[in-house]
Amino acid sequence: MSALTAYVRSVGLLGPGLADWSSGAPIIAGAAPYRPCPTVLPAPQALPPAERRRIGATVRLALGIAQQAVASAAIDPVRLAAVFASSSGDGAICHEICATLATADRQISPTRFHNSVHNAAAGYWSIATGATAASSAVCAYDASFAAGLVEAVTQVAVSGAPALLCAYETAYPQPLYAKRPVPDSFGTALVLTPTGEAASLARIALSLRDTPGDTPDDRMSDPQLETLRVSVPAARSLPLLRLLARRQPGRVALEYLPEQHLTVEVVECR
């Protein structure tokens, strides 16, 4: 794969001890201490009240980070293509459906069902913003952030227009947690553009490599941030976010295919 490039216009962030990008960037950069605490998910005020009552944690997280990134970019979401990336969707709702199917009364709530599908966040984003541009929902297990980044940067390169990437995970309840131990919610969103602007944070270039980078830049120096990185698939983004937070050129290798890693190089910072 030849290098794909795009500019990062803005970042949205939400996770344990990371309330948003403005307050979380110094922590990720190593300039402020990391004090993890349970993630607080915002209520998406842009949704009509009826829809707001129906959504689960995954949609709240996805819309929260997307709205952060779009507001920071000062860009109209109506014509903004979007990529939503999650390793497995809403684990809590899947648990509720499985628990219902295990009872004598196997009636599944239609609301629970439509919130369980992998592209639920994309649908609610369209409702919340009136977005009419194309949206995609991708899943690649622990490599979902990398897969979403490839999809979003490819869209920018092909269309010559901005795109939004949202990568997110929410915690799993037992007994699913025993098989998929995701301990808390974490999500990040990037607004990507084809050309640099005064507000751009950096230019990034993507390429595939057959061997992992295995350098210190691929891991987090803070032990608690490193635990977050390896335990929540969307948090595989942290090494890249650290370069963006530091406004520092560099290269990271992200988990992708079994025989290949996705190399992301920050080649220009502003």
Image (spheres, rainbow, N blue to C red):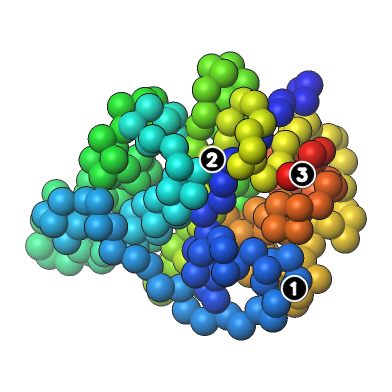
- Residue 210 appears at what percent x and percent y? 85, 35
Residue at image point 63% right, 33% down: 197
Residue at 75%, 77% (x, y): give it.
Answer: 223
For the N terminus, give its image quadrant.
Answer: top right
Q: Mark 3 vs mark 1: which is more N-terminal?
A: 1
Q: Secondary structure at mark 3?
A: strand
Instruction: Measuring from the top left, give residue 39's x and y in whole percent.
Output: 46, 73
Q: Contact (CB < 8 A) between labels 3 and 1?
A: no
Dot 3 and dot 2 residues touching (CB under 8 Å): no
Residue of label 2? 191
Mark 3 packing: few (<14 Cα in 10 Å), some, or many (20+)?
some
> Which of these two is toward me, 266 or 213?
266
- The residue wearing badge 1 is 31
Other residues around mark 1 within 10 Å, as few (<14) / some (14–19) / many (≥20): few
Tell which circle, 2 or 1, labels the residue nearer the N-terminal end.
1
Q: Tell me the amino acid under the disc marked 3.
A: Cys
On-image quarter of the C terminus: top right
Q: Position of residue 192 (x, y in %)?
A: 58, 35
**Residue 38 placement (x, y as % from top left):** 47, 79
Q: Is residue 218 above or below residue 258?
A: below
What numbered label is drawn on residue 269?
3
